């Protein structure tokens, strides 16, 4: 395999890894934004439940105050009724007392309704507060891990980019230009293995003569079907390695 092909294969591998790291770096803030948005929605829900519970309790307190007012009024009416001079006055006081009793019963019925309604609200608020504390801790943990992962990714990305710059500086400009053109144009591989006489990018079988020329490994060649830069890189067996060693040498462990 000619050196330019080895370099361009390395370059494609680096670009793939750079792309993966860049996508992860971009995805991490979106992940944090999603869980923070979920947390915020849970906070708003808890605040709404707390507000509803507070309103419930406020209404109950107001109604309890109204009952006290009606009871005091009723007590005064009863005292006044005892001093009534005529039946008309007596029944007028009784009518007012009945009105107070109705108002008291109405308030008591409403208080009972509010108490029934408050029970699930209290349970929801209590459970939501507990769950929210756990969720906040989890979000803080995710934020911390994301910051650490992003920092590590940035270091990794810088290393890949340094290696890429070195590979580009060594690669023949014409080959690099062809690679960049293919990389920007192709949705699949810009550089593809064709060792088995089939392009790994488009999966089309190579012409026999083209394949024979490719096996020589003396020039950069492009797939006649999809245009990908193709190469021939057969696996080397142990026997082949042994045969290529100088006489008396031992294969590497």
Image (tube, rainbow, N blue to C red):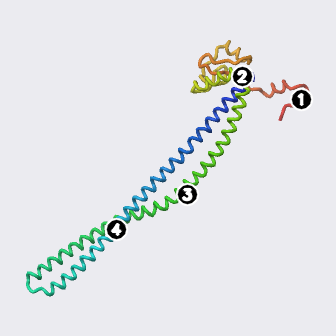
Toward the right, the furthest residue is 248
Q: Which label's residue is closer to the chain start, 3 or 2?
A: 3
Helix, strand or loop under label 1: loop
Q: Which label's residue is closer to the chain start, 2 or 4?
A: 4
Task: Return the mark for residue 172.
Answer: 2
Residues under labels 1 and 2: Cα distance? 35 Å
Helix, strand or loop under label 3: helix
User: Mark 3 and 2 residues: CB-CB less than 8 Å, in contact?
Assistant: no
**Can you say whether 135 is above or below 116 in the image?**
above
Helix, strand or loop under label 4: helix
**Within-10-Å neighbours for mark 2: few <14, some 14–19, many 20+:** some
Count of numbered badges drawn on the protein: 4
The image quadrant where one finds the N terminus is top right
Nearer mark to the viewer, of 1 and 4: 4
Q: Which residue is mark 3?
A: 137
Q: Which residue is mark 4?
A: 58
Q: Which label's residue is closer to the chain start, 1 or 2?
A: 2
Q: Which residue is mark 1?
A: 249
Picture coordinates of residue 119 (x, y %)?
A: 38, 65
Q: Residue at x 66, y 29 (%)?
A: 12
Q: Residue at x 65, y 42 (%)?
A: 154
Q: Which label's residue is closer to the chain start, 1 or 3?
A: 3
Q: Which label's residue is closer to the chain start, 3 or 4?
A: 4
Task: Return the mark for residue 73.
Answer: none
**Within-10-Å neighbours for mark 3: few <14, some 14–19, many 20+:** few
The image quadrant where one finds the C terminus is top right
């Amino acid at each position: 395999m000619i050196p330019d092909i080895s370099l361009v294969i390395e370059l494609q591998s680096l670009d793939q890894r750079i792309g993966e790291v860049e996508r992860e770096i971009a995805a991490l803030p979106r992940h944090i934004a999603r869980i923070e948005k979920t947390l915020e929605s849970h906070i708003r829900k808890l605040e709404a439940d707390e507000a509803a519970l507070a309103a419930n309790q406020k209404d109950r307190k107001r109604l309890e105050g109204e009952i006290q007012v009606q009871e005091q009024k009723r007590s005064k009416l009863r005292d006044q009724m005892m001093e009534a001079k005529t039946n008309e006055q007596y029944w007028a006081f009784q009518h007012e007392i009945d009105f107070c009793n109705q108002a008291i019963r109405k308030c008591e019925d409403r208080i009972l309704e509010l108490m029934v309604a408050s029970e699930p609200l209290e349970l929801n608020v209590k459970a939501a507060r507990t769950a929210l504390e756990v969720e906040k801790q989890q979000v803080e943990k995710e934020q911390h891990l994301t910051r650490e992962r992003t920092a590590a990714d940035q270091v990794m990305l810088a290393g890949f980019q340094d290696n890429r710059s070195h590979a580009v500086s060594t690669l023949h400009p014409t080959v690099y230009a062809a690679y960049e053109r293919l990389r920007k144009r192709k949705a699949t591989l810009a550089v593809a293995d064709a060792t088995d006489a089939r392009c790994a990018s488009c999966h089309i079988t190579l012409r026999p003569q083209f394949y024979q020329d490719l096996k020589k490994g003396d020039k950069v060649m492009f797939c006649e079907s999809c245009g990908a830069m193709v190469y021939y890189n057969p696996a080397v067996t142990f026997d082949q390695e042994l045969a290529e060693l100088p006489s008396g040498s031992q294969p590497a462990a």
